[in-house]
Image: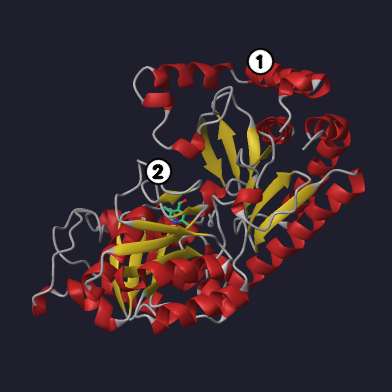
C-alpha cells in the first residue's frame, strides 16, 4: 500500500482539507481537547473517532445535524444505522413524552413490553420467545449464552470481519478484547472454511453467529448459496444458527432473513428498533429460549434497563406505526437506487469506487482490488480521510470508513444532493485519489 508520504499530490490535498477543517471547527476542537482530558481518546465510543478530531454535534432536526460551530450537515451517518427515524419524528416524540408522563422508573413489568415483543415476533417468526437487552452487543452475548446453555456445548464459530459488538469483534480475527469464548473464525462466504472447522470441532460448537451483511466488514453481503449451505451444515450437527440482524433487520419487514428466505434458529436485533433509544433483543425457538424461563427452573437473565419504559414505548410506535413492512421495502429500494447512482460516479471519473452493502446501508471503498472477502479491503486510510473531509466540507456527513446509512425523513432531493456532491468531490480529487492508489 502506498503511503501519503510517497504521494505529494494526495499529501497536499489532505493537508488543505485538514487545514480547512481545523479552521472551520475551533469549538469542536476545543471540546475534543477537553474530552481527551477525561475520557480515553476523548470519546466513549470508538467508531466516532477520526483524525484530526471528531466534530461535536449539538442538534439534530429531521435528516440534518448541526455541529458546535454552527454548520448543518445532511446526515448520512444515520447514527450508524440506529438513526433510521431521523431526529424529529412527532410520533416518537409523542410516545416518549407519554411514557415520561407515566413515570419512567416503575420497578416492575410495564404495559409496553409484551405487546412490543408480539410485534417483533410477528415480523420475525423465528423469535418465538424474546428477551430485551440494552444494546446489540448484549443481545448477541445472550444469544450465544442461550446456545451454549441449550446445547451444553462450549465453542462458538464466527467469521473474520464480523462485528457483533464492542467485545465481540472479529475484524482481523479474534483478539484479546473479545469475550474469551473458545472461538473458531471461518472465512465469510467460504463454506469449505466452515466445513473444515466443523469437521475438526463440530461436536463442541454451540452456535454460529453471522451478519447477513458485514457492517464493519465493509458491506460484504452473504451469498445465498453460502447461507443455505450454512443452514444445512448447522442443522445437521445440532448447532444453533444465530443471525445478527442488528443492522440488517431494516432490509425488509422481516429483515434480511425474510428477503433471503433463510430461517435461523435465533435472531438478534438492536439499533433503530428502540425508536432511537437504547435497545437490543434476542430471540429464537421456544425450546432454546426456555433456558431463561424462571417458572420452569431456568436461569436468570438480568438487566436493570432491559424493559425500560422509554425504549419499550418508543420501539412499539416505531415498528408498529412507522417502520411498516411497506416502508421497509421502499427504503430498501431507495437505497439500492442511490447505491447504483453513487457507483456510476466512479466509472464517470475513472476512479475505482466500489459501493458495497444492501438497501439503505452502504460502504464506499476506493481501491482497485475486487472485494469478495474482508481480507480484500485495502482502501488506504488517506483516501478514506479525503473522501470524508471533502464531503463534510460540502455539507454531507458520512462515516469515516465510507459508511452511509439512509433515514426515513430524507427526501429525493437529499439523495440528489449527495450524488451531486460526491460527483464534485471525485471530479476535484480524482488525480489525488489515483495517485494514492499507485502501486496498489
Ligand atoms: N451487531 C452488529 C451487526 C452491529 O453493527 C452492532 C453495532 O454497530 C452491534 C451488533 C452492536 O450493537 P450495539 O452497538 O447496540 O451494542
Q: Which residue is mark 2?
A: 175
Q: Is residue 134 left or right of residue 353?
A: left
Percent across and percent down for residue 360 are 63, 60
Horizontal arrangement in the rendering, residue 219 relative to residue 81 (left or right): right
Q: Quadrant of residue 17?
A: top right
Dot 2 falls on a residue whose secondary structure is loop
Residue 148 position (above or below residue 415): below
Asked if residue 421 lies left or right of residue 26, the reply is right
- Label 1 residue SS: helix
Q: Residue at x 48, y 68 (%)?
A: 196
The answer to which of 382 and 307 lies nearer the viewer is 382
Which residue is label 1 attached to? 23
The residue lying at 39 percent from left, 76 percent from top is 119
User: Which label sits in the foreground, 1 or 2?
Assistant: 2
- How crowded pointer 2 is (Cα within 10 Å; few <14, some 14-19, many 20+) is rated as few
Can residue 215 be seen in the rendering of this structure? yes
> Residue 281 appears in which quarter of the rendering?
bottom left
The tag earlier along the polypeptide, 1 or 2, is: 1
Amino acid at each position: 500500500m502506498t503511503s501519503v508520504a510517497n504521494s505529494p499530490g494526495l499529501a497536499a490535498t489532505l493537508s488543505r482539507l485538514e487545514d480547512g477543517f481545523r479552521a472551520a471547527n475551533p469549538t469542536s476542537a476545543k471540546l475534543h481537547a477537553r474530552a481527551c482530558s477525561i475520557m480515553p481518546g476523548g470519546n466513549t465510543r470508538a467508531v466516532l473517532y477520526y483524525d484530526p478530531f471528531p466534530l461535536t454535534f449539538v442538534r439534530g432536526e429531521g435528516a440534518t445535524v448541526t455541529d458546535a460551530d454552527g454548520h448543518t450537515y445532511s446526515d448520512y451517518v444515520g447514527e450508524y444505522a440506529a438513526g433510521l427515524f431521523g431526529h424529529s419524528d412527532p410520533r416518537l416524540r409523542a410516545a416518549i413524552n407519554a411514557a415520561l408522563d407515566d413515570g419512567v422508573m416503575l420497578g416492575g413489568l410495564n404495559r409496553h413490553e409484551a405487546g412490543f415483543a408480539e410485534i417483533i415476533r410477528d415480523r420475525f417468526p423465528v423469535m418465538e420467545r424474546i428477551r430485551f437487552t440494552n444494546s446489540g452487543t448484549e443481545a448477541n452475548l445472550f444469544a450465544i449464552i442461550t446456545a451454549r446453555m441449550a446445547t451444553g456445548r462450549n465453542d462458538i464459530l464466527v467469521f473474520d470481519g464480523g462485528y457483533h459488538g464492542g467485545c465481540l469483534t472479529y475484524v482481523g480475527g479474534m483478539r484479546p478484547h473479545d469475550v474469551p469464548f473458545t472461538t473458531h473464525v471461518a472465512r465469510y462466504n467460504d463454506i469449505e472454511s466452515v466445513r473444515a472447522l466443523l469437521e475438526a470441532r463440530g461436536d463442541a460448537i454451540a452456535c454460529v453467529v453471522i451478519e447477513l451483511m458485514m457492517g464493519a466488514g465493509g458491506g460484504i453481503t452473504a451469498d445465498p448459496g453460502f447461507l443455505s449451505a450454512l443452514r444445512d451444515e448447522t442443522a445437521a450437527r445440532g448447532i444453533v444458527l444465530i443471525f445478527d440482524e442488528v443492522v440488517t433487520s431494516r432490509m425488509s419487514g422481516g429483515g434480511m432473513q425474510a428477503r433471503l428466505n433463510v430461517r435461523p434458529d435465533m435472531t438478534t436485533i438492536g439499533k433503530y428498533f428502540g425508536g432511537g433509544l437504547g435497545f437490543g433483543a434476542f430471540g429464537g425457538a421456544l425450546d432454546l429460549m426456555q433456558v431463561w424461563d424462571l417458572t420452569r427452573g431456568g436461569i436468570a437473565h438480568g438487566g436493570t434497563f432491559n424493559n425500560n419504559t422509554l425504549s419499550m414505548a418508543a420501539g412499539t410506535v416505531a415498528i408498529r406505526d412507522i417502520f411498516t413492512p411497506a416502508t421497509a421495502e421502499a427504503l430498501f429500494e431507495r437505497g439500492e437506487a442511490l447505491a447504483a447512482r453513487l457507483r456510476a460516479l466512479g466509472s464517470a471519473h475513472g476512479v475505482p469506487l466500489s459501493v458495497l452493502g444492501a438497501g439503505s446501508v452502504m460502504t464506499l471503498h476506493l481501491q482497485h482490488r475486487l472485494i469478495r472477502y474482508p481480507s480484500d479491503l485495502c482502501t488506504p486510510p488517506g483516501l478514506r480521510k479525503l473522501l470524508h473531509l471533502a464531503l463534510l466540507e460540502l455539507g454531507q456527513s458520512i462515516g469515516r470508513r465510507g459508511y452511509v446509512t439512509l433515514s426515513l425523513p430524507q427526501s429525493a432531493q437529499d439523495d440528489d444532493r449527495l450524488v451531486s456532491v460526491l460527483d464534485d468531490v471525485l471530479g476535484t480529487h480524482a488525480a489525488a485519489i489515483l495517485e494514492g492508489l499507485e502501486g496498489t
